[in-house]
Image: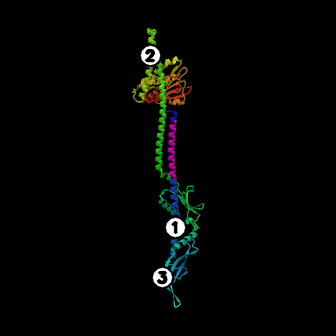
Amino acid sequence: MSKKLFVLLIVLMSLSLIGIIFVQSFFINNSIENEDKNFTLSVKRSLSYVSKAIEDYEFRSYFEKLQPFLNKDNKADSSILKQLFIAEEDDINNKTIVHRNTVLEERFKVPSLFNEIDADSFNISKLYSERVTETFNTTTIDGVRRMDPETRLREYSSLGALDKQAYEDSFKDLLKDKPVYKRVSQEKVRALLERELNDEGIDLDFEFAIYDDDLATKVQSQNFEMTPNVYGIKIFLDNNNDSSFNLWVDFPDRKKYLLSSIMWMIILSIIFTSIIIIAYTSAIYQLIRQRQISQIKTDFINNMTHEFKTPIATINLALDSIRNPKIIGDQEKVLRYLGMIKEENKRMHAQVENVLRISKLDKNELNISKERIELHDLVEDAVTHVELIVEDRQGYVKTHLNAEQSSILANDTHFTNVIVNVLDNAIKYSDEAPKIDVYTENVGHNIIVKISDQGNGMSKAVAKRVFEKFYREHTGNVHNVKGHGLGLAYVKKIVEDHQGHISVESEKGKGSTFIIKMPLIS
């Protein structure tokens, strides 16, 4: 896959993921807004019913107090009789139609019901209505006009609806200056609010208060606070449908209530979006990882090719020399060339074995038997493997074996290879004469081995990846250091198989320190 195609794929996948998250967020936000609108509508409808219910309750309360003074057994203090006559002549049919409307008003004196001190009384009027329509035949006999009744329609009522409206208007005028806490109680307001809100399906704690313009009254719940999120409606409307009193209701847990109504949708959206994000991240990681592995394998093949080219070329040259008639008779030179062929063959064999060994470690097929050994002995044995090479380059390997206890459970061969590989790495990456120090110390129930060099060192980025299989620091196409990126990967696998830990501390240009931590055995 080309780099441009890879980047394009990453960009498209990222845009798709961002789009999905944006759509989900928009959908959830839109749902919350709709729930908020429905909640506001339900609360306002409930408050409208509560306002009407408070007024009806107040009217019923005082009208019931008036009833004893307005019943039939109670004699009126005064009466007024009013009549209206309308006569209509029908000359064509010789008829006369007479309309009569009689209104009887009875007045009662009632003690004051709206003041604590009954110092005054006021008049209440009770109205009765009689409506009569009569039709007369108009005849003339001997020049004398006569009117004979033909039909009579009579309607009688006490004007109940009119009475009620008159009483309501009067009450509104009489009660508008009365303190609100004497007109309705806190308990009544709460009961009405609970009933209407429950009818609207709102089962939520609330706080309420009645305000006279901007001043709070005594009719309010204990924890009410005026906030921008309160809902209000006018109550105790006068005859002009206006009032200075407002009923305010606040819902402290409103946001939680709105979220709870769509909580399952939010949870499912978060779960599915998280799954998509995890899958996307995993896919991106695998793509990047596969690209890195592909690049590492390419580098590995190039390095292996380079590593094999030298021994193959050496073997070919040695064979050509042996075929030379001048050389074939010289037994000393023949043996020398045969020795070169054997050494180069061993070198290639060792490289192949390293690759196979790492493969077996990855598949857990490498059987490593462990026994009690002294780590100090392994260190000294490993040093002898590289001592001649170091001396040949005018360098040194010094040991500082300060650990009092060094018994560990390990495989002699493999753990020796671990230390040899680290020492060999220090030698390879020292441009000048190798200067290597090996330290041991006991920390708790562990032994620490530190292998320090004063070589080239490495950057932090390289140090993080130095134990990866096939990884080598990029130096262009210059193969000034032989290897194929398997030595330290093998080291890490073996150390971890022995329940140990390996790390590296390094600074570019100042050298590196490899730290191996192994558990002791008693």
Residue bounds of the magenta highlight: 6-33
> Looking at the image, which is closer to me, 223 or 87?
87
The magenta stretch spans residue 470: no
| Residue linked to disc 3 | 151
Residue 210: where, in percent of width, then height? 56, 61
Residue 494 to residue 167: above or below: above
Task: Determine whether the residue tagged by mark 3 lies in a helix, strand or loop.
Answer: strand
The disc labelled 1 sits on which kind of residue? Asp
Q: Nearer the viewer, mark 3 or mark 1?
A: 3
Q: Callout 3: 10 Å neighbours few (<14), some, many (20+)?
A: few
Residue 431 % position (x, y): 55, 21
Please tell me in which quadrant of the rendered image residue 228 appears: bottom right
> Outermost residue toward the right?
214
Residue 336 makes an appearance in the image? no
Reading the image, the residue beneath label 1 is 56
The residue that mark 2 highlights is 341
**Can see residue 130?**
yes
Give the percent coordinates (x, y) of residue 182.
55, 66
Sooner in the amino-acid sequence: mark 3 or mark 2: 3
